[in-house]
Amino acid sequence: MLTPEAHGRLPGGSSPVSQPAKRLSGTPGRRVRLPHGHLTGRLLSRSTRDTALRRRLTERTRRTDLRLVLPALLVWGTAVSGNWLSPAELAGLCAALTAAAGILLLFAGRGKVGRVGFGHGKVRSARLRSARAVRAAAGQGPRPGPAAARSLRATVAVALLLSLAAGAHAALEASRRHEGAIAEAVAARAAVVAELEIAGAPRRLRIPGPGGLADRWAVPVMLKTMTFGGHKVAGGARLVVMGGAAWEHAVPGQRLRAPGKLRPAAPGEPDAGILTATSAPTVLRGPGPWQQGPGELRRAFTAAAARFGGDAAGLLPGMVTGDTSALDAELEAAMKTVGMTHLTAVSGANCSLILGTLLLAARTLRLPRTAAAVASLAGLALFVLMVGPDPSVLRAALMGSVGLASMTFGRVGRGLSLLCVAIIALLLAQPVLATSFGFLLSVLATLGIVVTGRRIMDWLPPAVPRWAAAGVAVPLSAQLFCAPAIVLLQPQFGAYALPANVAAAGLVAPVTLLGTAAAALLPAVPAAAELLMAAAAFFAGAVAGIARWFAALPGAALPWPEGAFGAATMGIFSATVLAAGWLALHPAAVVRAALAAHARVVAALERRSRAAARTAARQALRRGLEHRSGRGTLRVRKPTSGRNHEWLLPRPNGPGPRRRTPPPGAT
């Protein structure tokens, strides 16, 4: 009887444990190969396979996180409905959302969590991990189980609860628009005397008014009180004032009194009505200290930029402080033609540049990561305060931060999650943004940068510098995603939008950074600020020159279908451009894919031909015909029960009596 030691003895006289020990104690740096049949070899090979499977599993799980997409879409849809539905209809919608969320949470909480023993639980969890790793390595997804179903129900329930919060806020805003004395005055088109608080920067209107007034301004305001019909009504509704040149100098935070006539806003608009001012406003109170300083700084910067003349005098304040009052109408039309309108005012790109520069400076000073993030966000907050904390600026700052985080850290899934969180937060705070085209374009541009920006950078050859790759990838991804929405606003195709934005991308950073530094130094060191503004004005003039040059080229603005059909076709065109770019930048992959497709087609044709041959053979046997090679005869096999008779077919020259053929004319 063999002992365990003798049973496992190796040819060299060593045991299975001592042999690997000898091999492991060999020359360092050499690759150790153990017999697969030994216990140690099995363990090491299994650990190696587990490590490889774990690595492949980790690579496969680095994918886009879509868990917050459904809540963001539901919140957005609820906020959009809040701008169209009445308060009673919104109340019914909120009740339905509450009931659906309660039912899903009830079913999600009924799941039972299984309990396993101490010893068997470890074995079972190890088997589960091994099975998941094997399925992931084989390219298969995890098997959906009860836990996944409960998680899905809980996710949908949370999405419904967030939508309920957005619907409740939208119902509150809708009650101010549709009910009460303010809604009655708007419906009656009453003449009122209103006390207003300026809520945003004035915007020049290019289209003359009904009375032939050429210089018209639109100012967003909040209605505080109004007097009509001998009654004074307190309100908190949102209005838009249409007035003359006297409204050009309105400052956010300012309290004014103005007479005018109310009229309803367009359907789906978030404003309670439109006030057409009949005279100049009377100033009741100036803006607060935190609003007065930035306003004076913006006006001083615009006045200082006017000394440079040309296109820079109007474009530089718009790109740095968001003041577009001095922008030339022809330049604005040219930038709209080539898709550079986002550069005429502060956008997410400017906020990304400011935040990225502050982060780089903080890390250069070797600040800790948390301290650098706090300092950078504080600097971005000061920039937003200087530009003016309008909803559009806050939205641009938030979207720019999301895009910068996605491009810098390369986390596509995390960038999409941050974008969804930003959408939910903005819509919960201000549901009126749901129907804003500016909000839609910001979301689409950020989505394009998050989803495809980093991938386009990776597509480019390694010889291309990263800054140049980013200069191509960012405008391309943003343009492709925004193009379908732009068609809804302006049914035309900017043939040179991409090259114009790529050409201007390298000039936006100097204008933003130098102009922002000049604005910060303008009150304290005017001489240094003027030097910085001169350099920024040079780059701003170059941006304007690029816009005018591309807009003057033939075919700069091509007609495109309107409406949903135009948006759909533009989406297909954008996807085609993206696919063509990938094909052009991956010729080896295209060749391999073509060869693989050719091999699949050949294999399919061969399988089809073999199947056709087998089918023909079976049909020939079924008809009872059989050909025997080398015999020169065709025999007929008659399938009878238990027997198989064969006989020769008649031969023309065979033995036997011949059939007589009667001569011609015989009867």
Image (cartoon, grey):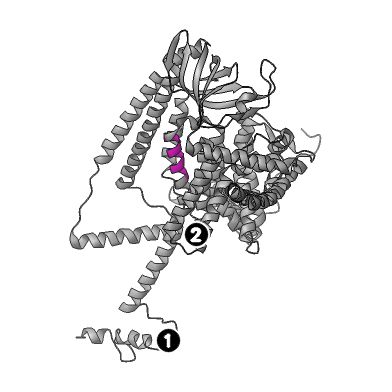
Give neighbour class at mark 1: few <14, some 14-19, many 20+ (Cα, 10 Å).
few
Give neighbour class at mark 2: few <14, some 14-19, many 20+ (Cα, 10 Å).
some
Foreground: disc 1 or disc 2: 2
- Look at the image and tell me in which quarter the N terminus lies: bottom left
Q: Is residue 610 magenta?
A: no
For the point 36% across and 34% down, the residue is 160
Instruction: Give the SS element for disc 1.
Output: loop
Q: Residue furthest right?
A: 665
- Look at the image and tell me in which quarter the C terminus lies: top right
196 left or right of 604 in image: left
Look at the magenta stretch and give its main secondary structure. Answer: helix
Mark 1–mark 2 Cα distance, whole angstroms, equals: 45 Å
Instruction: Identify the magenta region.
Output: 419-428
Q: Amino acid at mark 2?
A: Ala
Q: In the displayed structure, would residue 203 be above or below residue 445?
A: above
Tell me the residue that label 1 is attached to. 28
Mark identifier at residue 132: none
Tell me the residue that label 2 is attached to. 362
